[in-house]
Image (cartoon, grey):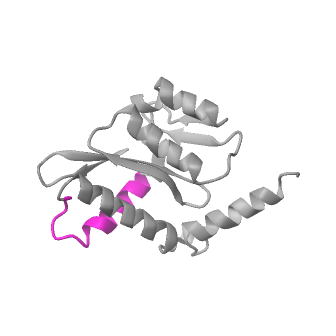
């Protein structure tokens, strides 16, 4: 999760799940608070966005929302495995931290002030950014393709490896 500054001095909270291989953001949610429901809503979106993959590894930091019962039950219901960062090792979550850095840099560099007007502005801006990020932004780590293109290719390869 990351915090997004609002003009009134409060914060909005963003949780997102990203496919490690394709870089595609597959599920996300922005809210005014950061309860477990923020995380489970983002994870449900991630599960809805792609075919069920038993044994899928879902990584997070050690935040309380990622240890809670509803989150763990959602992983269990989708046959996904929970992975968490080691205590005190920020490098275990480097891909998520990199995503937050890019999101904030690329959104705020085009804004007059580095804050969102309100929660709705934060939600809309994040939606627009992730649409751009997934469908237009080229990444050197995936041969200068978009995350969406790479994700589709990987899903097709994965489908070919499952017996009928």
Query: Is residue 163 shown left or right of residue 135?
Result: right
The residue drawn where x is 49% and y is 24% is 69
- Residue 43 shown in magenta: no
Q: Is 4 rendered above or below residue 85?
A: below
Q: What is the total number of numbered labels drawn onto the structure image? A: 0
Residue 138: image x %, image y %?
Answer: 51, 74
* Residue 106 in sight in this render: yes
The residue drawn where x is 63% and y is 53% is 50
Residue 73: image x %, image y %?
Answer: 56, 28
* Residue 63 in sight in this render: no
Residue farthest top in this picture: 69
Q: Which residues are magenta?
A: 97-116
Query: Is residue 80 shown left or right of residue 63?
Result: right
Asked where in the image residue 99 lies, by quadrant, the reply is: bottom left
Q: Is 99 rendered above or below residue 108?
A: above
Asked where in the image residue 57 lies, by quadrant, the reply is: top right
The residue drawn where x is 31% and y is 61% is 124
User: Main structural element of the magenta stretch: helix, strand or loop?
Assistant: helix
Residue 137: image x %, image y %?
Answer: 47, 73
Residue 153: image x %, image y %?
Answer: 69, 67
Query: Is residue 5 shown left or right of residue 56?
Result: left
* Foreground residue among 26 and 96: 26
* Foreground residue among 48 and 95: 48
Residue farthest left in this picture: 8
The residue drawn where x is 38% and y is 65% is 129
* Foreground residue among 93 and 71: 71
Residue farthest right in this picture: 164
- Quadrant including the N terminus: top left
């Amino acid at each position: 999760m990351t915090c997004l500054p609002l003009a009134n001095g409060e914060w909005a909270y963003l949780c997102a799940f990203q496919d490690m291989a394709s870089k595609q953001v597959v599920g996300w949610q922005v809210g005014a608070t950061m309860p477990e429901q923020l995380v489970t809503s983002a994870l449900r979106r991630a599960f809805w966005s792609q075919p069920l993959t038993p044994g899928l590894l879902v990584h997070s930091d050690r935040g309380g929302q990622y240890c809670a019962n509803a989150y763990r039950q959602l992983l269990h219901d989708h046959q996904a495995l929970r992975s968490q960062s080691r205590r005190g090792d920020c490098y275990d979550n480097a891909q998520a931290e990199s995503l937050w850095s890019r999101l904030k840099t690329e959104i705020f560099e085009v804004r007059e002030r580095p804050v969102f007007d309100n929660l709705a502005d934060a939600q809309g801006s994040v939606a627009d950014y992730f649409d751009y990020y997934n469908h237009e932004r080229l990444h050197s780590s995936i041969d200068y393709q978009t995350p969406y293109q790479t994700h589709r290719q990987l899903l097709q390869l994965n489908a070919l490896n499952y017996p009928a």
